[in-house]
């Protein structure tokens, strides 16, 4: 990977709510990565608010892609998150084929569900359409809910290592190369990340804070991708992004009015320090 890679991030712009592109752009920039964007949709705010508007941008993608082809624009990596529609998933696969350098890396966060439930507007047909995108990626970054939906496994709040190994195995059997499975905790006070390649599995365990915050999946995935493209190993990137996400939650936890996201900006200096 080049020392100054150019990545394309495909996800929505939620104008308010600290998620998707408003999180990915600053975090990837902080990691020293040139970041280009392809907005999948524009929302007034994310869908965890009671009211939201959503303008889907699926139909804009072919013309943008044609223009990039004329300009010979190519990317060293792709990172996708929340996509507005099933049609968009297919377009994204085309974008990977048409606009990647020879060894372009693909990072896919399914960004469709959490805590045992789909985000508003998504259902099993979206999860089914996500499978080829996730299983074809170099790195997929699901949370446990998404991993269950992608493997047709019943979601459980409490589980043991066998349950997690079984889900990982199903994903690898479906083609997944490297899986970064977030939010996995085996005791009440801990949580962590599993880094699973086809032939080895590692676990980074850390403290679990008493409050979970919206948007932390996007913060985690952005920091992982940024650290990885900066040249860190998958294990180091998983640790750096977990510690960063934990700090973001810590910096938000005492402010109940800030329920819609995390104050990730306050922790950016510490993230940058990892690359000093
Ligand atoms: O953080 C995931 C996310 C991204 N984008 C939109 C969302 C959500 C989660 O609810 O609604 C629009």
Image (cartoon, rainbow, N blue to C red):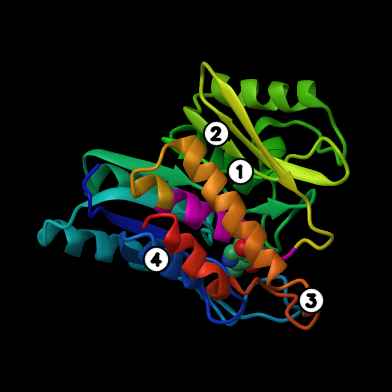
Tell me the number on the disc at residue 179: 2
Disc 2 to disc 4, C-alpha distance: 24 Å
Disc 1 to disc 4, C-alpha distance: 23 Å
Q: Residue at x 73, y 40 (%)?
A: 184
Q: Is mark 1 on a helix, strand or loop?
A: loop
Which badge, 3 or 4, comes first in the chain's sequence?
A: 4
Which badge, 1 or 2, comes first in the chain's sequence?
A: 1
Q: Is mark 3 on a helix, strand or loop?
A: loop
Residue denoted by label 4: 30
Disc 2 to disc 3, C-alpha distance: 32 Å
CB-based contact (under 8 Å), mark 2 and mark 3: no
Query: Looking at the rendering, which quadrant does residue 274 occupy?
Result: bottom left
Q: What element carries label 4?
A: helix
Q: Which residue is drawn at 76% across and 71% down?
A: 253
- Indicate if the residue with disc 4 has its beta carbon within 8 Å of ligand 1: no
Q: How crowded is mark 3: few (under 14 residues within 10 Å), some or many (20 or more)?
A: few
Disc 3 to disc 4, C-alpha distance: 25 Å
Q: Depth-wise, is mark 3 or mark 1 nearer the camera?
A: 3
Q: Is mark 2 on a helix, strand or loop?
A: strand
Q: Where is residue 163 in the image (x, y as percent from the top left)?
A: 78, 25
Q: Which residue is drawn at 65% across and 71% down?
A: 262
Which badge, 2 or 4, comes first in the chain's sequence?
A: 4
- Left or right: 97 as drawn, with respect to 14: left
Q: Is residue 224 a member of the stretch shown in magenta?
A: yes
Residue denoted by label 1: 142
Magenta span: 213-226
Q: How crowded is mark 1: few (under 14 residues within 10 Å), some or many (20 or more)?
A: many
Which badge, 1 or 4, comes first in the chain's sequence?
A: 4
Disc 1 to disc 2, C-alpha distance: 8 Å
Q: Where is residue 75 in the image (x, y as percent from the top left)?
A: 24, 52
């Amino acid at each position: 990977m080049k020392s100054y890679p150019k990545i394309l991030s495909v996800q929505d712009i939620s104008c308010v709510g600290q998620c998707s592109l408003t999180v990915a752009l600053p975090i990837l920039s902080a990691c020293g990565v040139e970041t280009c964007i392809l907005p999948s949709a524009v929302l007034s705010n994310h869908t965890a608010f009671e009211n939201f508007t959503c303008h889907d941008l699926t139909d804009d993608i072919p013309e943008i892609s044609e223009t990039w082809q004329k300009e010979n624009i190519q990317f060293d990596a792709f990172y996708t998150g929340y996509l507005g529609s099933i049609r968009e998933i297919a377009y994204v696969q085309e974008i990977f084929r048409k606009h990647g350098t020879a060894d372009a890396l693909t990072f896919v966060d399914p960004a469709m569900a959490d805590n045992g439930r789909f985000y508003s507007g998504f259902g099993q047909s979206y999860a089914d359409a996500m499978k080829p995108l996730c299983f074809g990626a170099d790195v997929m970054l699901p949370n446990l809910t998404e991993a269950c939906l992608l493997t047709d496994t019943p979601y459980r709040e409490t589980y043991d290592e066998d349950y997690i190994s079984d889900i990982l195995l199903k994903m690898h059997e479906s083609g997944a190369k490297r899986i970064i499975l977030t939010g996995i905790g085996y005791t009440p006070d801990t949580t962590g990340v599993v880094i699973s390649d086809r032939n080895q599995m590692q676990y980074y365990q850390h403290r679990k804070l008493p409050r979970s915050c919206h948007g932390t999946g996007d913060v985690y995935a952005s920091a992982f991708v940024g650290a990885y493209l900066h040249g860190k190993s998958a294990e180091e990137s998983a640790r750096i992004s977990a510690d960063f996400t934990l700090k973001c939650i810590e910096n938000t936890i005492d402010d109940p009015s800030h329920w819609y996201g995390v104050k990730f900006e306050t922790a950016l200096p510490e993230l940058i320090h990892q690359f000093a």
